Image (tube, rainbow, N blue to C red):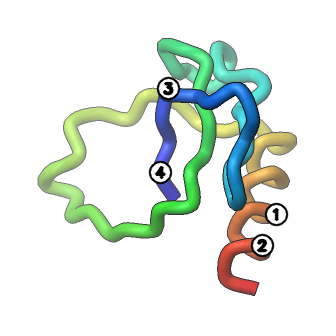
Amino acid sequence: MAVTSQIRAKAGFGEAVIEDWHSAGLLKPSAIKPIVFTAEKTIVRKTLGQLSDNNQDSLRAVIESVIG
């Protein structure tokens, strides 16, 4: 799933706002978008942070709504 700081006023299908973005280590308010992709480790520049348990639950709910 993709994480973006480009947040719309109303979340679209499969989107979830990361409520505690700052404590997750993100630089700006962010949201999870329903874009599934695979990235090789060699192209990942750095890890920004980690989702809280609460936001991990939101991510699971998004995945379930997108793929069933």
CB within 8 Å, label 1 to label 3:
no
Location of mark 3 (residue): 5
Quadrant hosting residue 45: top left
What is the three-letter code of the residue carrying label 2? Ser
Q: Residue at x 72, y 41 (%)?
A: 11
Residue 39: x and y in percent read 27, 62
Residue 36: x and y in percent read 46, 68
Residue 24: x and y in percent read 63, 26
| Earlier-in-chain disc, 1 versus 3 | 3
CB within 8 Å, label 2 to label 1:
yes
**Crowding near pointer 3: few (<14 within 10 Å), some, many (20+)?**
some
Location of mark 1 (residue): 61
C-alpha distance separating marks 1 and 3: 20 Å
| Earlier-in-chain disc, 2 versus 4 | 4
What is the three-letter code of the residue carrying label 1? Ala
Q: Residue at x 56, y 51 (%)?
A: 33
Q: Secondary structure at mark 4?
A: strand
Location of mark 4 (residue): 2
Q: Secondary structure at mark 3?
A: loop
**Farthest-out residue, bottom:** 68
**Crowding near pointer 2: few (<14 within 10 Å), some, many (20+)?**
few
C-alpha distance separating marks 3 and 2: 21 Å
Q: Secondary structure at mark 1?
A: helix
Location of mark 2 (residue): 65
Q: Residue at x 64, y 14 (%)?
A: 22
| Earlier-in-chain disc, 3 versus 2 | 3
Q: Where is 31 relative to 13, above or below?
A: above
C-alpha distance separating marks 2 and 1: 6 Å
